[in-house]
Amino acid sequence: MLAGVLQAFMPILSMLHTQEDRTGIGLMMRRVMRLVTFFDILFTILFVAFPQGLLFLYEVQDPETAAITITAIRIFSFMFLFRGAYLFFQQYFQVVGRKAYAVVISLIDGFVGICPLAYVMAMAFGLKGLWLSFPLLSAMLLTGVLIENMLIAKRSGGKYRGLYLLEQADMDEIVFEQTLCGDRDTITEISEEIRQNCLKHHIDEKKANIIALSCEEIGIYTEDQNVKQSRSEQLLIDLMIRIKKSEAVMIFRSESLPFDWMKAAGEDYSNIWMLKKIADKSEYDYVMGMNQTRISIII
């Protein structure tokens, strides 16, 4: 169940990583970790308090076998306090391209770690030592992952930060984050704010106008689609603008029914037609109920 919960969040984290949305990645990871911690504690309490449920599931009826099994389940269940966290790191590292790190975690979590530890613990403490080796391995592995993450962040010279190894923006990179909401007038006002922010960061006026125009047109088009879908709630459009030396990247996300503005008919010289001409590169995707648009403009 826990693995299923983690896998459900991986497409979103993959999308955020592709879009280099560092703020979104940090927010999502903290939420997922809180959810993982909740389930870890819940499963541990359930198995410690009600191990008889598993006995009933596997039809264990012999009293002597049942007593040994209950002890084993209670000891084994403490593994959940640690395992969910490093499984999350394992899957996250696959998403962000640290596949070798993820493989190492997987191997230690499997036979590479448990076989020698279980042998040593069984020889030292008997059958209880065998079962104790599972939570002990989980605690040791999570501790090792956290220490390694801190060392990677320290060795990166500021490129990565914290236990989640969140990549930091380049010094010469400008990032704007804004929420577009409301009617056309409100979207137009926010677009003007974006233009003024660009000018404050010494971006050429023509380029600032193009960036603001692109944001305005996508915002208005998205709002029009919301009206066509007869949605009563106010539409919120999450906007992130990343400006580098030679490129401006705009990322739009909105939670609604799918629509692909890139396939819109758009008559010549219409707003959509102009946006297609302005953009040097455009991408659209629909992930877990969310429209994703990425527009790149060479500046």
Image (tube, helix red, strand yellow):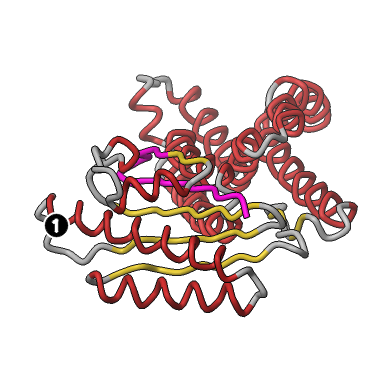
Q: For residue 214, which quarter of the picture?
A: bottom left
Closest to the observer: 29 or 264? 264
Look at 43% across and 44% down and name the residue there. 277
Residue 104 picture location, percent across and down: 76, 29
Look at 29% across and 76% down and name the residue there. 186
Residue 203 picture location, percent across and down: 64, 69
Position above or below: 221 against 69: below
Closest to the observer: 79 or 156? 156
Look at 54% across and 48% down and name the residue there. 296
Q: Which secondary structure lies at badge 1? A: helix
Position above or below: 10 against 162: above
Closest to the observer: 281 or 109? 281
State the extent of the magenta-drawn residues as a range: 284-299
Q: Quadrant of the N terminus?
A: top left
Answer with left or right where residue 135 lies relative to residue 239: right
Residue 180: say if magenta: no
Residue 207 picture location, percent across and down: 56, 63
Look at 36% across and 34% down and name the residue there. 53
Residue 263 picture location, percent across and down: 30, 35
Q: Residue furthest front?
A: 268
Position above or below: 263 against 78: above
User: Magenta stretch mostly in which secondary structure?
Assistant: strand
Residue that carries the numbered disc 1 in the rendered image: 227
Closest to the observer: 246 or 58? 246
Q: Amino acid at mark 1?
A: Val
Q: Number of marks in the image?
A: 1
Q: Quadrant of the C terminus?
A: bottom right
Q: Residues within 10 Å of mark 1 (few under 14, many from 20)?
A: some
